[in-house]
């Protein structure tokens, strides 16, 4: 595969149907705005070709005759070439093109924390990382869309560009692309993500855990209302299902619930016909808990509902990220 610079006429031919096909209307710059950028040397376009013809194309925003920084404005692989490694090869060619020229390429990637499709945003970040780009602390907001900024530099660059310099160069390039009919500061913001303020981690962790607990309580309350359940009664059913004959005190200790609360919940579950108590012959002060047939039949339904809740709150995570989340949270538990 090789790349070749495209002229204005060639780009006009690519605009329709290629760009109109590959990008939604709200993301695509009208041709009447794009053409002057090309003619004035602010937009440089390249095509990536192989033995089958055009495999992909990329449009860059630059400033000056010998720009050091280029913003990748549009990049797409032809539909019939996708999934065949063409995108990765294009990144390799971009890196070769800037080699020895003291140049860099800026990539915008939608922030996974705010993107409509977080998983797609994460895949895009991984794609650029595999291609040799690095993540930076620079962030931008453009027409309401939040981006993380990545940069591809010459291999072996001894002094990578600082976040402060990168932010300044990105803002200068945005000034080129934002139409004069818009008030720049109202539609565009470039900034550097700062470190967390003191105490913010603990606050955010507590807020997140509280949200998850309340979310699960509300979800399970709605699902089990028809059975007469409330609060954490379902947790007692599941624990006794796994450990028949367990004492009330042992249940309280495992679930971090005070003994009086467990006693009230056990009494209610007895009234609902879900469990029964037997006096421990070795310690008549203790009650051993067992599920009734009704309780044993209900346990799988409870587990199904808990699975549904878990799937909902982690829908934006990959299986690997779910495993990492559990592993990290388990490390915070003091035995």
Image (cartoon, rainbow, N blue to C red):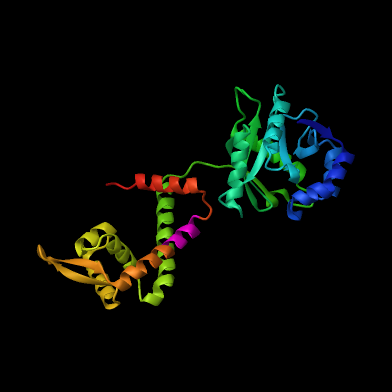
Instruction: Give me the residue at 40% from left, 75% from top.
Output: 225
Total labels drawn: 0
Is 241 situated left or right of 152 in this image? left
- Given residues 34 and 21, the one toward you in this image is 21
Question: Quarter-wise, where is residue 62 in the image?
Answer: top right
Task: Determine whether, in the image, residue 211 is placed left or right of residue 146.
Answer: left
Give the answer, above or below, for where 209 lies relative to 263: above
Going 27% across and 47% down the picture, which residue do you hit? 335
Examine the rendered structure and indicate whether residue 167 appears above or below residue 187: above
Q: Is residue 265 above or below residue 153?
A: below
Is 59 covered by the magenta stretch?
Answer: no
Is 194 left or right of 186, judged from the image as shown? Answer: left
Residue situated furthest right in the rendering: 9
Q: Is residue 138 visible?
A: no
Q: Quadrant of the N terminus?
A: top right
- Left or right: residue 194 compared with residue 79: left
What are the residue bounds of the magenta stretch? 306-314
Q: Nearer the viewer, residue 69 or 227?
A: 227
Give the percent coordinates (x, y) of residue 162: 60, 31
Kindly indicate the quadrant of the structure image that contains residue 102.
top right
Q: Main secondary structure of the magenta part?
A: helix
Say which residue appears at 75% left-offset and 44% top-offset. 80
Q: Nearer the viewer, residue 35 or 47?
A: 47
Q: Position of residue 93 (x, y in %)?
A: 72, 30
């Amino acid at each position: 595969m090789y790349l070749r610079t495209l002229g204005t006429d060639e780009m006009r031919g690519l605009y329709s149907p290629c760009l109109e096909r590959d990008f939604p209307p709200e993301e695509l710059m009208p041709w009447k705005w794009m053409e002057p950028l090309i003619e004035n040397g602010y937009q440089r376009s390249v095509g990536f070709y192989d033995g089958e013809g055009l495999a992909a194309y990329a449009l860059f925003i630059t400033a000056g005759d010998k720009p050091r920084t280029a913003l990748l404005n549009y990049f797409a692989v032809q539909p019939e070439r996708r999934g065949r490694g063409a995108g990765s090869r294009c990144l390799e060619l971009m890196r070769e093109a800037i080699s020895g020229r003291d140049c860099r390429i800026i990539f915008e990637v939608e922030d996974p924390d705010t993107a409509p499709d977080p998983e797609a945003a994460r895949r895009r970040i991984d794609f650029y990382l595999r291609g040799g780009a690095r993540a930076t602390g620079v962030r931008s907001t453009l027409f309401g869309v939040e981006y993380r900024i990545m940069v591809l530099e010459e291999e072996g660059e001894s002094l990578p560009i600082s976040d402060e310099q990168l932010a300044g160069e990105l803002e200068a390039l945005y000034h080129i692309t934002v139409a004069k009919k818009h008030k720049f500061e109202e539609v565009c913001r470039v900034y550097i993500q700062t470190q967390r303020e003191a105490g913010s981690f603990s606050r955010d962790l507590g807020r997140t855990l509280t949200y998850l607990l309340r979310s699960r309580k509300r979800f399970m309350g709605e699902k089990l209302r028809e059975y007469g359940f409330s609060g954490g009664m379902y947790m007692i059913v599941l624990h006794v299902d796994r450990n028949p004959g367990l004492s009330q005190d042992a249940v309280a200790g495992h679930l971090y619930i005070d003994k009086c609360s467990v006693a009230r919940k056990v009494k209610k579950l007895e009234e609902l016909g879900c469990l029964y108590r037997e006096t421990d012959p070795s310690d008549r002060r203790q009650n051993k808990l067992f599920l009734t047939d009704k309780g044993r039949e209900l346990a799988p339904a409870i587990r199904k509902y808990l699975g549904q809740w878990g799937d909902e709150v982690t829908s934006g995570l990959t299986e690997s990220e779910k495993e990492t989340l559990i592993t990290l949270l388990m490390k915070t538990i003091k035995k």
